[in-house]
Image (cartoon, rainbow, N blue to C red):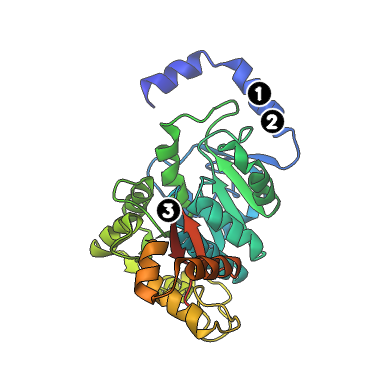
Amino acid sequence: MPAAALDYLRAPNWQRVEQDLAWLERPGNHLLSLDDPRYPPLLRQIPQAPAALFVHGETDCLRMPQLAVVGARNPTPAGQETARQFADYLARGGMVITSGLALGIDAAAHQGALAGGGRTIAVMGTSLDQVYPAKHRDLARAIAEQGALVSELPTGTPALAENFPRRNRLISGLALGVLVVEAALQSGSLITARLALDQGREVFAIPGSIHNPLAKGCHALIRQGAKLVETANDILEELGALAAVNREQPPGLTVADKPTEPLDADYRQLLIAMGEAPVGVDILVERCGLTAEVVSSMLLILELEGYAAAVPGGLYCRLRPG
């Protein structure tokens, strides 16, 4: 054992031990050691597996087939919707969605799994008696009711920057594979993907526009051998029998295409003019030959119908084709 660990064992912090024991007495709280039969078997196989896991919620889902979904903390609206739809689709089939409770893609993945009535696991970079970011308290509560919150950190551990990259090995280690939805070239999501490769896990990436900086990380992964993903079935085909989920979804339906009433021709033309990258009203006026007032009015309707979304900088992003 490392010298620091031996030094600690010679003089334990008994106050912290008492805090952990008090936490364990509360309903739904568990501490799983490496030799506990409830300890997730895939995680046990990784280098430096945690000696113990703090869990709040169900422990059964830790042993079920999992897909980790990670990505940018400030994603495009289209990226958020993609993560949500993939998680919804896969959760409905019985796959557990694992992520890190962070802003952006992580939260969208958890929300999609919950909406699909499936299970989801949040691996936290704090102890389980704290929630970071604080705005995700309600989300964390919902995850615990329909899955589990997991951490290797003892009670009283705050949100320290060094703990978040460290927990990424648990996100990938719990899962059969990692799906990266949107990521910049310098992204923690790429760290998770590299850890997944080191652990012998599958890596999946969703491509995007060459003009979107948040697609560059995914494109780099694809060039390095990650599987390019367009539908949830691409993931299930790669994982095969390991996933062991219900694939009886409507034929031909992908997570990016939901049946809706067809749009009028003018609205479809505006969506086509938007392209794959965020674009301003002035550019759309130039491309469509319509007035700024008409384009602005149409964009409002497209937002309300879920076809487009406003993004910072006065730009608009297409969420799905018409």
Residue type, numbered disc 1? Gln
Mark 3 lies on residue: 71
Please state the horizontal and vertical placement of residue 99, each as a whole percent of the image.
Answer: 51, 51
Query: Which mark is first along the chain, 1 or 3?
Result: 1
In depth, the one of 38 and 244 nearer the eye is 244
Mark 2 = which residue?
23
Task: Inspect this view and state whether residue 276 appears.
Answer: no
Report the residue at 51% width, 45% height from top. Answer: 102
Name the secondary structure under disc 3: loop
Residue found at the very far top of the displayed protein: 11
Determine the CA span between mark 3 and mark 2.
31 Å
User: What kind of element bears circle 2?
Assistant: helix
Q: Amino acid at mark 3?
A: Gly
Q: Is residue 156 visible?
A: yes
Q: Residue at x 56, y 72 (%)?
A: 245
Asked where in the image residue 61 lies, by quadrant, the reply is bottom right
User: Residue 1: percent from the left, percent from the top?
Assistant: 39, 27
Q: Is residue 317 above or below residue 143?
A: below
Q: Residue at x 69, y 33 (%)?
A: 24
Closer to the camera in the image, 55 or 78 = 78
Number of labels in the image equals 3
Instruction: Give the percent coordinates (x, y) of residue 218.
Output: 32, 59
Q: Which three-letter amino acid code belongs to the residue tagged 2? A: Trp
- Provide the residue designation for mark 1: 19
Q: Are marks 3 and 2 in contact (CB under 8 Å)?
A: no
Helix, strand, or loop for circle 1? helix
Image x and y of residue 30, in percent: 66, 40
